[in-house]
Image: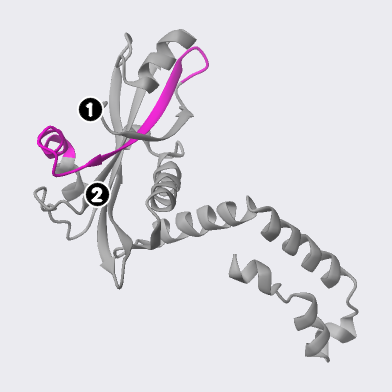
Amino acid sequence: PRVDGDVVAVAEAAGVGDDVKAVDVIRAFRLSDAAVYPWHARFEPLILFFIDGASAVDSEDDNWTLLCATRHVYTSDAERDAIISGASDGNHGWSTAAFATIYEFFQYPDKKRARLSQIVVAPPFQRQGLGSALLSATRALATKRSFVDVTVEDPTPQLQRLRDVGDVRALWSLPSVAAAVRAAAVAASKLSREDVEKEKAPLCLALQCPTSVKNE
């Protein structure tokens, strides 16, 4: 695989068997790079089988980013480290497991936003957490590049649910959000049935999100 991209995420592969060790590496590439788009062209036709109304992206447009997840089997920590660093593909085989394409937009006056255009997990690797991993990698990339936001182009109901779960996990990882949720849960547990059924003010006050958390 291409190893000259930026490593965005690394995780131990799930669902490969108890006696097999494998690592999933997600790298980000500029799709217009001469060494990248021919590689992408080899697996891009998969979108025709898994995305309704899919069309090929313009590989000459510098605004496209490719996120690609490759799975590598390894037998030692040294081999794993070499895979992640890009020094080796591994000595026991590798596969292109999943990929996503992201388009960058200009936002006045000096910001950028992004749109997740396509996301595909190859059938042998589905239901192993790679879809969630690509969404998390997209979020991490957006943070690194200081994007204003990230939208999803025509998401399926399944992808919407997956994104909602990922957003909740990302929010829960913020200490201030977790503390606010716990405080709201404690306050709500002290409300009486009358507070809930007849008086809206106590309920709204108990579940109100602190301004500092909203700003964050």
- Residue 14 visible in rendering: no
35 within the magenta span? yes
Quadrant of the frame with the N terminus: top left
Amino acid marked by disc 2: Phe
Q: Is residue 178 left or right of residue 56?
A: right
Q: Is residue 170 left or right of residue 49?
A: right
Whole-angstrom CA distance, mark 1 to mark 2, is 24 Å
Give x and y (percent) for residue 89. 29, 16
Q: Quadrant of residue 7?
A: top left
Residue 2: image tag: 1
User: How many residues crowd mark 1 within 10 Å: few (<14), some (14–19), many (20+)?
Assistant: some
Mark 1: secondary structure = loop
User: How many residues crowd mark 2 within 10 Å: few (<14), some (14–19), many (20+)?
Assistant: some
Mark 2: secondary structure = helix
Q: Which contiguous range is marked in magenta?
A: 17-43
Give x and y (percent) for residue 131. 40, 44
Amino acid marked by disc 1: Arg
Residue 50: image tag: 2
Give x and y (percent) for residue 150. 38, 61
Q: Nearer the viewer, residue 1 or 159?
A: 1
Q: Residue at x 12, y 32 (%)?
A: 35
Q: Residue at x 31, y 15 (%)?
A: 87
- Residue 64 visible in rendering: yes
